[in-house]
Amino acid sequence: MVSSPPSKRQDLQGIRGIAILSVLGFHFYPTHFPNGYLGVDQFFVLSGFLMCMLLTKTEKLPIFTRISNFYARRLKRILPLYLLFISLTLLALCTVFPEAAVLQNQESAARALVFRSNRLSTGDEAYYEKLQVAVDLFTHTWSLSVEVQFYFVVPVVFLVGNWLSETRKYGFYIGIALTSAAFYSILPADEAFNSMFARIWQFLIGMLTFMLSNNSETFSGSRLKYVILLAMPITIAFPTQLPTNIVRFLFTILTASLMLISADDTILSNRLLTYIGDISYSLYLVHWPIYAFSKLTYGDNYYAFTGGLFISVLLAIIIFETFEKWYLQLANLNICVLIIAFFMLSGMLINKQWLFPEPDIEYPRLDGINSNNMTIEDVDQMNKYWNQMDLRSMVEPGCVQRTPTHKRWCDFELPGSKFKIAIFGNSYTHNHHKMFIQEFESQVYNVTMYSEKGCEPLAARQDDKNCMDKLTQFVEFIESAKPDYAFMFTRYFSIADAFENKTDPDLKNDRIFCQMKSQLNELLPNIKKKLYILDSMPLVNAPYIPKIAEDLRNGKSIQEISKSLLPSDNYKNGRLRHAALVKECGRKCELIDYLPLFFNKITNMYQYVDSRGFSYFTTLYHLSAHGIELVRPIYSAIAKSLK
């Protein structure tokens, strides 16, 4: 039988403080702290330590009592503040936030509510893309989902381990940890990142650390301790992102080693660092929505991020000193009532449509503009509405899933009788499909659709394993569909990457162009008549879109606003590659070019707003409903020309 666990160790709160500071650095200042994500790995080790400590404290009690006590203490700590956070974030979404993808956050909040935020990422919802766009206000809850899911595993692991002898117990824990670590190593990066089973090894290292510290005399190693304390900030602030798998394993072991040898350490136990550890839970929850607000409102503004960080810390202190300290003193019955109340409130806020009002009038146009006599207030209202409805407008009823193995392949059965058409690409495919179906339904009997957000059908960056894998799926989709005509809807990513020789691009030796040709050669044999390819165009400065109406009120001209919406980028590289590709392809390929529609001959510039201030784009970088109406004539003409 093991001895009684030690009293609360302040040095562990200090490590917790280091962990939350690392995460804050990674989110608010990713270029300065590119490895700050490792703070979450430290949290997992600390959580494993705490779970083992809680279960050990009650080991003399009956099994049912031990397990119920464990869950009562853990859920009491986590749920009240977590559910309050979800409710307040949803309220902020429809009141404080200038723009947000409402549908995405409704769905994300629903997943967060039941701790499913760590479900396997898709092309539509890649974690690091979420960090860059900062639209999903619940992105960071994935780690809590992993931890809570492990709560269903840890009592079984602990009880089985306690039935074994001391030596076999350690072997049992180590065996499970090695199996989980191996599972983590062989999984694709996105799956390994989110999978609870691929993270068990980190929790178990924390549990092993507790058992070693509890069953032995205090470990010594002052020199090693200071080496680790020095190595951690150097790793977090290293100017480039280190190899994730290697540094994650190393950082996990270093954290566990520090926990073994840092008992009563004066550096880790100092009042400032331990207080940061005390407020870390509140700080972790509130900082991401505040960061997202800063990002969506001010773009990549250093001072806005610094202000957001300051507000996050201040708000976390207020929450900790008031709400957290209050509810942690409540009896279990009162906590239960509080949890039920917040859960019901969160559910109501997720599902209540009155939070996300739609216009009272139904318009014949997709953009809802039926008058030339519209005010700046109308501009503000409609620009916001198009942003709010961006993702919802991509959900078109009637698309029937084609195969059980390819959930993203689906078919629209239409009243026409002449042609079968395939539309495919990234999220621009869904962005266009309603208008496309309207224009082609009289001639087409079937439209089959496949989209992967963030991935192009013709090329992918070598370090993007997700999109590299999707290249094969795009080919399989066309092979399966065998359409008469195909339309490729993409906004560029890799296709616009810089050429190695910027002054004299060598397409023959350009990796991306060669990949594009190879993909095209795979696609064309299964397209009977013609492939239409959407050409590259400048990306919109999406964070500026919410400011259009305000700047109009302040007297800015449309020309000044247009300049703010068009940052410089490499879109011309994409156009150069597309032009060369279509030239080699011949009559079976044709480019669709939107740029002439955005060009104003009077001002001699591209304008992503019309003369009244209505935006052609959304904050998710898609064409707004107004932008879709602008490009509609192109597809009307193509539909009439099909033979």
Image (spheres, helix red, strand yellow):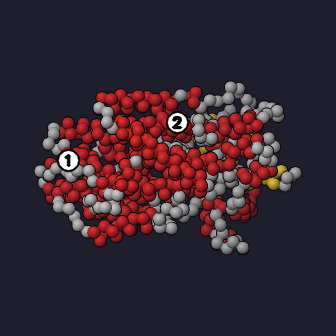
The kind of secondary structure element at disc 2 is helix
Q: Position of residue 56 (x, y in %)?
A: 20, 47
User: In the drawing, does residue 304 fall left or right of residue 635?
Assistant: left
Q: Position of residue 352 (x, y in %)?
A: 53, 28
Q: Earlier in the sequence, mark 1 or mark 2?
A: 1
Using the numbered discs, state the Cα–Cα distance from disc 1 to disc 2 in whole angstroms.
Answer: 38 Å
Please say if the residues under marks 1 and 2 sit with CB atoms less than 8 Å apart: no
How many marks the image carries: the answer is 2
Q: Which mark is residue 291?
A: none
The kind of secondary structure element at disc 1 is helix
Is the residue 85 above or below the residue 344 in the image? below
Return the residue at label 2: 90
Q: Of the residues shown, which amino acid type is indicated by label 1?
A: Thr
Foreground residue, 176 or 255? 255
Is the residue 454 above or below the residue 512 in the image? above
Return the residue at label 1: 56
Is the residue 504 above or below the residue 478 in the image? below
Quadrant of the rendered structure where residue 493 is? Answer: bottom right
Residue found farthest to the top: 360
Residue 300 visible, this angle: no
Q: Position of residue 227 (x, y in %)?
A: 34, 70
Q: Of the residues shown, which amino acid type is indicated by label 2?
A: Leu
- Please give the name of the residue rendered at 62% of the width and 29% of the height, measured from the top-left corner: 357
- Please give the name of the residue rendered at 64% of the width and 40% of the height, measured from the top-left corner: 387
**What quarter of the picture does the C terminus occupy?**
top right
Label 2: how many Cα within 10 Å (few below 14, some 14–19, many 20+): many
Foreground residue, 88 or 461? 88
- Please give the name of the residue rendered at 58% of the width and 27% of the height, measured from the top-left corner: 354
Q: Position of residue 414 (x, y in %)?
A: 66, 34
